[in-house]
Amino acid sequence: MSGLAEFLDLIMFLALCGLILLGFPVAFTLAGTALIFAGIGWALGVFDPSFFGFFPNRIYGVMTNEVLIAVPLFVFMGVMLERSKVAEELLDSMGQLFGNLRGGLGISVSVVGALLAASTGIVGATVVTMGLLSLPTMLRRGYDPALACGSICAAGTLGQIIPPSIVLVVLGDQISNAHQEAQRALGNWAPEPVSVGDLFAGALIPGLTLVGLYILYQIVTAVLRPATSPAMPRDAADADDTVRRLMHALVAPIVLIIAVLGSILAGVATPTEAAGVGAIGATLLAGERLVRGRPLPIYGAALGLVGLLVLTSFVDLRIARAEIPLADRVGIGLAALLCVLLAFGLLVALSRAYRDGTLVEVMRSTARITSMVFVIVIGAQLFSLVFRGFGGDDMVHEFLTGMPGGALGAMVVVMALMFVMGFFLEFIEITFVVVPVVGPVLLQLGLDPVWLGVMIAMNLQTSFLTPPFGFALFYLRGVAPPEVTTMHIYRGVVPFVLIQLLMLVVLALFPDMATWLPKAIFG
């Protein structure tokens, strides 16, 4: 009977992939496939329906998971920044700065993609925005359509690997669970925790290195094939005006990035708390951008937000204490004043965004994306439960541990499987279906959890670019001018896919790229 259960496990997984390719909604496909095969297994006597008794506890665990609360907050932050024209200003200013160099527009797209990745983290919004704003300009300036499309698609996917990223949030939660399960299987009942903050720190150096490789490719292409990326004529505007516009476009997003990432890496805030800081900062930035000329309430609120972060670092602000020293009392009073300042500026920003119609659109997009994520999570939990009920986790364990090459061989097989699955599935399905199954096995073989998480994130990023089903390609195809063909997009992304595969190899050969910073920061 065990052979029949393993056969049903395999058929269930293949059926899932096939149904998703037919266009059925992913969340309901996950749950529906699991229920159908559970019924078949029960009828054949190889599945115990009492496994479904664990399902309510799994849903409760997901919905009360504080880490996953960061998902809607980061989504809100990204959508708010996208609606408030931050990307438009960044692209325009970077184009003025680099455009008079050969390959300068491609370099500016890569730099802006990195900045938007660190501030929004939403691939679709970034690709569509840059496709609407940059692609027509690059084509008008004589850029090769394939190079222009590849640059935009690749830069748009940086939101997958550069923190704060929704991928790293959900992946960090899954890696943490897999690490605990692996350590318990090895007899360690008090393992060192692995947090989303560890994954954020681990992904920072590989992500920035990948941006550097993109820029290097743009420079080499401009040198070897000058006709593909000509320089823009220098704007008649003086240098002082260009610098002023650049500072106006750059300062606020960079401050927001530092506030969010810095608070996590400095240990001041958890990723969920930092996501709240990011959502507030994005709202204030939108309030300043949407109504020009009355920035004082917004500046005051921003000062209050930064001041609160600084106070939290140096002063104990807890009020439920028997004795509070005078210095702490002063700090608590100052924190109260800063909260009032922040609340007033936030109300002003929200009212401006509401009157402009931006707030309603942002809330709808946030609710839609967040609902999609969590419905998929629930479907994936049911699928995983049935998969384990058939003994699929034991089958995967035997398969991976029996691979030639030990941990390295198993890692190569899993990376290749995820790369191929990325042609057809989104990162959320892969994260919640595959990682809980293969993660504990790989970690039992002695792999570092942070390094494994960053490797998976980099691999999932590649899935957004791989033809023919890469989602970034579809996003750009939807907004590209008629003269840009699908083959232009496919040809353009191939070099960037090869660059990402090269980055995966480099990261595999030098794991310290992912593990050094978390150890240096968090010990």
Image (cartoon, helix red, strand yellow):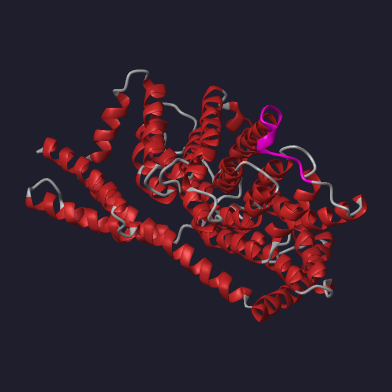
**Front one among 225 and 131:** 225
Q: Residue at x 45, y 42 (%)?
A: 463
Residue 280 quadrant: bottom right
Point 57% across, 76% down: residue? 360
Q: Position of residue 145 (x, y in %)?
A: 59, 44
Q: Is residue 392 left or right of residue 378?
A: left
Q: Quadrant of the N terminus?
A: top left
Residue 324 seen: yes
Residue 458: x and y in percent read 52, 38
- Residue 377 magenta: no
Q: Position of residue 46 (x, y in %)?
A: 11, 45
Rendered image quadrant of residue 230? top right
The percent position of residue 289, horizontal first and vertical second, equals 75, 68
At 77% across and 59% down in the image, what residue appears?
306
Q: Quadrant of residue 334?
A: bottom right
Q: Closer to the camera, 307 or 143?
A: 143
Answer whether residue 231 is magenta in the image.
Answer: yes
Residue at the farthest top position:
405
Range of the magenta residues? Answer: 222-232
